[in-house]
Image (tube, rainbow, N blue to C red):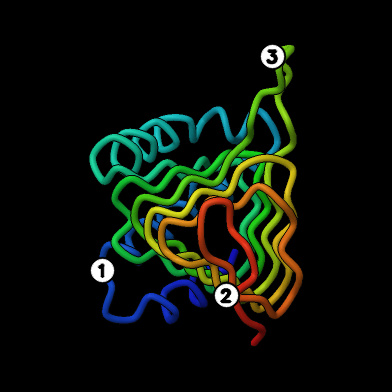
Amino acid sequence: MYIFQDWKANKGNIKGRIITLAFRIAYWLRQLPAPFWLLGSPILIVYRICVEWILGVELPFKTKVGRSLVIQHGQGLVVNDGTIIGDHCVLRNGCTIGIKKDIYGNNSKAPILGNYVNIGANAVIIGPVTIGDNVVIGAGSVVVKNVPSGSVVAGNPARSISKI
């Protein structure tokens, strides 16, 4: 449960600390066998009400998230529950990380983010894309294709503007 790593990564960011702490507790409860997590379902409901409705951060407790997650100004953050987020990632306000539907109404897979991914405000990452390690995604970017490790991408659609 990476509570202490998240707490340290969000130093000076009380909202980020509250969200990541609540997420880790809810995720842990959801991983328990059915009879036990059902007993904890009131906590899962409180998580959804407090974090999603009040704080405006849709980070489903089923989402796989690595250690040291940083949430900066989380308002309007939307993450699909199938998304996989690596270690030491930074998510900012207004980001959408999710799936897309094809012309037949079928859902795609969710994005996979590597380690040390830094996502700018209002960026959108949709579809079955893989974001490599050590990537910076500029504010307002729309990512619909894979991003190789060590890249800085920006724009709509996002394209590489430099290497790290």
Quadrant into which the C terminus falls: bottom right
- The residue labelled by disc 2 is 88
- Label 2 crowd bin: few (<14), some (14–19), many (20+), radius 10 Å: many
C-alpha distance separating marks 2 and 3? 34 Å
Give the foreground label among 2 and 1: 2
Quadrant into which the N terminus falls: bottom right
Residue type at mark 3 is Gly
Return the disc, 3 or 1, that comes first in the chain's sequence.
1
- The residue labelled by disc 3 is 105
Q: Nearer the viewer, residue 17 or 73?
A: 73
Return the disc, 2 or 3, that comes first in the chain's sequence.
2
C-alpha distance separating marks 2 and 1? 18 Å
Q: Nearer the viewer, residue 36 or 149?
A: 149
Residue type at mark 1 is Ile
User: Residue 77 at x, y = what percent?
Assistant: 39, 48
Return the disc, 2 or 1, that comes first in the chain's sequence.
1
C-alpha distance separating marks 3 and 1? 40 Å
Asked whether residue 130 appears in the rendered view, the answer is yes
- The residue labelled by disc 1 is 14
Asked whether residue 21 appears in the rendered view, the answer is no
Q: Nearer the viewer, residue 152 or 21?
A: 152
Q: Residue at x 58, y 50 (%)?
A: 28
Secondary structure of the residue carrying numbered label 2: loop
Q: Residue at x 45, y 43 (%)?
A: 78
Judged from this view, the residue extending furthest toward the bottom is 164
User: Residue 45 at x, y = what percent?
Assistant: 39, 31
User: Residue 56 at x, y = what percent?
Assistant: 30, 42
Residue type at mark 2 is His
